[in-house]
Image (tube, rainbow, N blue to C red):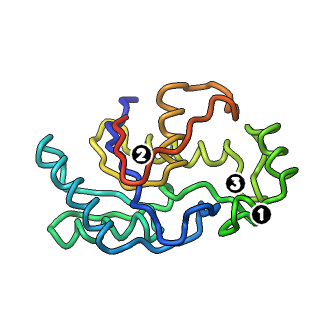
Amino acid sequence: MPEADLWLWRHPRPVGGAGRCYGRTDLPVDRRRAKRLAHRIRRVARRHALPRVVWTSPLARCRDVGRWLRRWGWQHHVDAALSELDFGTWEGRWWRELPREEIDAWVRAFAEHAPGGGEALPAFAARVQGFMRSHAGATTLAVAHGGWMVMARWLAERPGRAFTAADWSAAPPCGSHWRL
């Protein structure tokens, strides 16, 4: 199966997200930041003759960027497969308040542990890979989440390798762009 040409942007920095575990927590994003990222995506698309179609997570911090692009004549598709990892009971909590033993348990069993009882990495990987496979052979522009982007890069660059906490990279900065 031919690989997808994925142009990925991480959503703008959400309001109230600093220091929080906010995987699926639907935090808002400043309207100006969403518009600025939409402008950057539009410029890149023009420069590289990319399709005027964008896919986003249903969470506001991604979806709002797609809404700006739609106002400017783009097609905007929302796909739950682009959602961030589900952190279960950790969602919306301050990282510093999470019990250390729970974080340590996740690090020890990184490949199969579901943080906060949410989503384990194999299920997350299957969801990310499903999106990538459904766009195989196409040029796809998407606004996603940091963990989603890290997983997509892992799957593209390390197919079949077991997930390890030591090899897991940090999420890219908000607003950044990766091409896979």
Q: Is residue 87 above or below residue 29?
A: above
Q: Is residue 64 above or below residue 85?
A: below
- Which residue lies at the image location 46% right of the left edge and 74% below the top edge? 28
Q: Are marks 2 and 3 in contact (CB under 8 Å)?
A: no
Query: Quick one: label 1 or label 3, which is nearer the N terminus?
Result: 1
Q: Position of residue 155 (x, y in %)?
A: 53, 33
Amino acid type, mark 3: Glu
- Under tag 1, what secondary structure? helix
Q: Is residue 83 above or below residue 108?
A: below
User: Which residue in the protein does label 3 denote?
Assistant: 119
Query: Quick one: label 2 or label 1, which is nearer the N terminus?
Result: 1
- Under tag 2, what secondary structure? helix
Pick whichever, 83 or 173, lies toward us: 173
- Which residue lies at the image location 76% right of the left edge and 51% below the top edge? 114
Q: Mark 2 or mark 1, which is nearer to you? A: 1
- Spatial CA distance of label 2 from label 3 is 21 Å
For the C terminus, the quadrant is: top left
Query: Quick one: label 2 or label 3, which is nearer the N terminus?
Result: 3
Q: Which mark is residue 97?
A: 1
User: Which residue in the protein does label 2 denote?
Assistant: 134
Pick whichever, 158 or 93, lies toward us: 93
Q: Position of residue 135 (x, y in %)?
A: 37, 44
Q: Residues within 10 Å of mark 3 (few under 14, many from 20)?
A: some
Q: Position of residue 2 (x, y in %)?
A: 36, 29
Q: Quadrant of residue 47?
A: top left
Q: Position of residue 44 (x, y in %)?
A: 19, 47
